[in-house]
Image: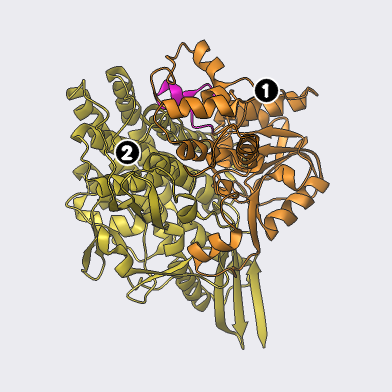
Chain colours: A yellow, B orange
């Protein structure tokens, strides 16, 4: 006997998705996660455009993680032209990422994920019963937004983030204000960690075949090298050799595998890998949690997100101090185009992303390749959903649907 | 309760996120309006009828077209938000240069995707649009004003003056005079000019102001170091059909050379 379970419109996820589960004789036969998001051809609309146009165009891949796409493209452009920026510019970029993560993780935790665990249809619906929790979500988002607006020029798609650096940089007083804000949100972030640690996370999935994130001696979101959980290390230039992309017959997101296997990326992969690299204050908080890392439970990505917020807020405090100490500094170095290919990788809030561009001698883009987190997550989410169904044979359809949605949301695809 | 819907077509969800960024205003609005459809933010969504439906994104797939036609039918007022919905957005910038088949083949290796895809279009190319709030993303104050105006029976109106006007008001030094490529003279103000304040030229994300002088704009951009082809491409990034029509008119009049110089 054949039976189908469909979730036609996934809610509280960015973009448009649907799930189709087919059973035959009470056994799982097939699972398809379909992203129906219309294609936007970024690899094609960047062609013939000057390098100065590229970060602006690819920023529009994602309204939530635009900073990551911009910085990955900038890193690829600077790589192609052999441009080197100053340590202060690098610090400002890192601070920008702190803002991005606070906003994106707060949006995900408080507005997309939280209603599942509190039993409400939305966070706005929670406002009456839990005003303080909702306010905390808004506050964390707001602090992140302020940092992005200050450095990038706008909260979303800020245009001041450019190859070579920034056209203008914050004043000492503004940096001090950011630092004050970050100090103020540390207790709020710790409360967020406790809140998400207090929920029950039934395990719906089996062990991950592989996970991937950017390698480094410290917890890092930018870099030139990548690490797989099986011990393999590779460089950003080798990304396409390891991460294989295929066009899917049922989803507009491409389907990626590493060594033929689905692989995990994102907060859980990063926290699992960098557990020993976290700041001591973060480590202490982690050691007191109910949730234990490294973890193979996909729902623990929510706790990992909250932990990342703490680590990054602490980093942000250090960065603002370093920038204040080295004031005044130049925000920009000259970038001279030349023919060549450049690569950029970056940890976006939801996972690793990769940009590659080839330019002609005048700096016009000849070809581009972009691998997004959503494309890389397709395979692992489908695998998780398969595990979920196998482990939930006792559950009715409504329950199964709810579990599937929670699992997908934990990836923030 | 006034029923509001927020619907996303093909885009980056940035405008919907900007709506969620209207924190305090959303709290105040919740007493007077009800978000009866906002799948990005909530589970229980009813797509039955709306007093006001906000539409983000371009019409790129058959699903987009179906959704926006249905949305129009069941809404008293339809507002296009963001430059994708208003003009076609970044994804439409090469509509005049290449075919959709070419784009599909290059990016996906096939013209057969799981959804039917056509060239990205503005919402107004498919259904009647009552108001447009362009920008990439839309300006959140304009979103709040629009809701407030409509609640009080006033037609939302935002004058289509150029961004130059905002630079005068904020006493920002003219970037065009400093030799920086800036689209302020032909771009619809209302954003508060955050880019020029940061020292970055206006990128034209809000589309045309009233009576945009493309010919003069291209000649200024050329003076500021861009080739004619690069100037065209710079102007085209967000404006979709608007710029493609404007530029082809100039070319057919002989005022400008061919693109791609």
Labelled pair 2, 1 in contact (Cβ < 8 Å): no
Q: CA distance from mark 2 to mark 1?
A: 34 Å
Q: Quadrant of the N terminus of chain A?
A: bottom right
Report whether A52 appears left or right of A121. Answer: left
Q: Would you say residue B201 sits in the magenta stretch?
A: yes
Q: Is residue A36 visible?
A: no
Report whether A96 appears left or right of B66. Answer: left
Above or below, B167 against A204 in this view is: above
Residue at 22% from the left image edge and 64% from the top image edge: A234
* Image x and y of residue B243, in percent: 61, 37
Front residue of B131 and B23: B131
* Image x and y of residue A55, in percent: 40, 42
Front residue of A290 and A212: A212
Main secondary structure found in the magenta portion: loop
* Image x and y of residue A402, in percent: 58, 63
Q: Would you say residue A29 sits in the magenta stretch?
A: no
Front residue of A328 and A96: A328
* Image x and y of residue A190, in percent: 35, 40
Q: Which residues are magenta?
A: B191-204
Q: Which residue is mark 1?
A: B158
How many numbered tags mark residues here?
A: 2
* Quadrant of the image occupied by residue B131: top right
Residue at 30% from the left image edge and 69% from the top image edge: A241
Q: Which residue is mark 2?
A: A163
Residue at 70% from the left image edge and 45% from the top image edge: B123
Above or below, B51 against A31 in this view is: above
Q: Secondary structure at mark 1?
A: loop
């Amino acid at each position: 006997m054949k039976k189908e379970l469909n979730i036609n419109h996934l809610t509280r996820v960015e973009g448009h998705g649907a799930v189709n589960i087919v059973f035959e004789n009470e056994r799982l036969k097939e699972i398809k996660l379909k992203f129906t998001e219309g294609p936007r051809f970024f690899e094609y609309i960047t062609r013939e455009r000057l390098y100065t146009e590229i970060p602006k165009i690819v920023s529009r891949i994602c309204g939530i993680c635009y900073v990551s796409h911009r910085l990955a493209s900038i890193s690829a452009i600077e790589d192609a032209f052999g441009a080197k920026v100053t340590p202060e510019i690098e610090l400002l970029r890192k601070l920008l990422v702190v803002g991005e993560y606070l906003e994106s993780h707060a949006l995900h935790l408080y507005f997309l994920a939280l209603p599942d665990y509190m039993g409400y249809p939305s966070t706005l619906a929670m406002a009456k019963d839990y005003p303080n929790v909702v306010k905390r979500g808004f506050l964390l988002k707001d602090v992140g937004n302020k940092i992005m607006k200050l450095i990038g020029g706008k909260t979303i798609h800020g245009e001041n983030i450019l190859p070579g650096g920034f056209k203008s940089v914050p004043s000492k007083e503004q940096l001090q204000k950011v630092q004050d804000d970050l100090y103020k949100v540390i207790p709020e972030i710790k409360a967020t960690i406790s809140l998400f640690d207090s929920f029950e996370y039934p395990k719906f999935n089996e062990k991950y075949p592989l996970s991937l994130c950017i390698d480094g001696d410290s917890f890092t979101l930018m870099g030139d090298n990548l690490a797989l959980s099986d011990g393999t290390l590779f460089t950003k230039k080798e990304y396409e050799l390891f991460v294989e992309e295929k066009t899917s017959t049922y989803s507009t997101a491409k389907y990626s595998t590493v060594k033929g296997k689905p692989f995990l990326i994102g907060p859980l992969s990063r926290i699992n890998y960098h557990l020993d690299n976290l700041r001591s204050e973060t480590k202490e908080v982690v050691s007191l949690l109910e949730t234990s890392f490294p973890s193979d439970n996909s729902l623990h990505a929510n706790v990992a997100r909250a932990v990342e917020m703490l680590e990054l807020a602490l980093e942000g405090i250090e960065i603002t101090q370093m920038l204040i100490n080295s004031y005044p500094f130049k925000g920009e170095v000259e970038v001279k185009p030349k023919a060549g290919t450049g690569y950029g990788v970056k940890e976006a809030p939801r996972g690793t992303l990769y940009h590659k561009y080839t330019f002609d001698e005048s700096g016009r883009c000849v070809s581009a390749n972009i691998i997004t987190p959503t494309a890389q997550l397709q395979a692992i989410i489908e695998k998780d959903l398969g595990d979920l169904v196998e482990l939930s044979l006792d559950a009715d359809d409504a329950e199964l649907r709810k579990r599937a949605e929670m699992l997908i949301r934990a990836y923030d695809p | 309760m006034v029923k509001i819907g927020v619907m996303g077509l093909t885009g980056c969800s940035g405008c919907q996120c900007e709506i969620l960024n209207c924190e305090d205003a959303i709290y105040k609005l919740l007493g007077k309006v009800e978000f009866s459809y906002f799948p990005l933010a909530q589970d229980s969504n009813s797509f039955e009828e709306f007093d006001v439906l906000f539409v983000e994104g371009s019409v790129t797939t058959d699903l987009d077209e179906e959704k926006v036609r249905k949305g129009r039918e069941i809404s008293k007022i339809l507002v296009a938000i963001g430059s994708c919905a208003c003009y076609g957005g970044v994804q439409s910038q090469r509509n005049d240069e290449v075919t959709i088949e070419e784009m599909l083949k290059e990016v996906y290796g096939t013209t057969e995707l799981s959804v039917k895809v056509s060239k990205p279009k503005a919402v107004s190319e498919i259904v009647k649009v009552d108001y447009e709030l362009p920008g990439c993303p839309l300006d959140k104050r304009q979103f709040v004003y629009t809701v407030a105006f409509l609640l009080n029976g006033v037609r939302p109106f935002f004058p289509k003056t150029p961004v130059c006007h905002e630079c005068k008001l904020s006493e920002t030094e003219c970037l065009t005079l400093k030799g920086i490529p800036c689209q302020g003279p032909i771009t619809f103000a209302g954003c508060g000019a955050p880019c020029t304040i940061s020292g970055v030229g206006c990128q034209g994300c809000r589309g045309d102001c009233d009576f945009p002088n493309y010919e003069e704009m291209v000649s200024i951009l050329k003076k500021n170091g861009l080739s004619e082809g690069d100037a065209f491409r710079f102007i085209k990034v967000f404006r979709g059909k608007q710029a493609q029509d404007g530029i082809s008119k100039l070319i057919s009049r002989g005022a400008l050379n061919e693109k791609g110089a």
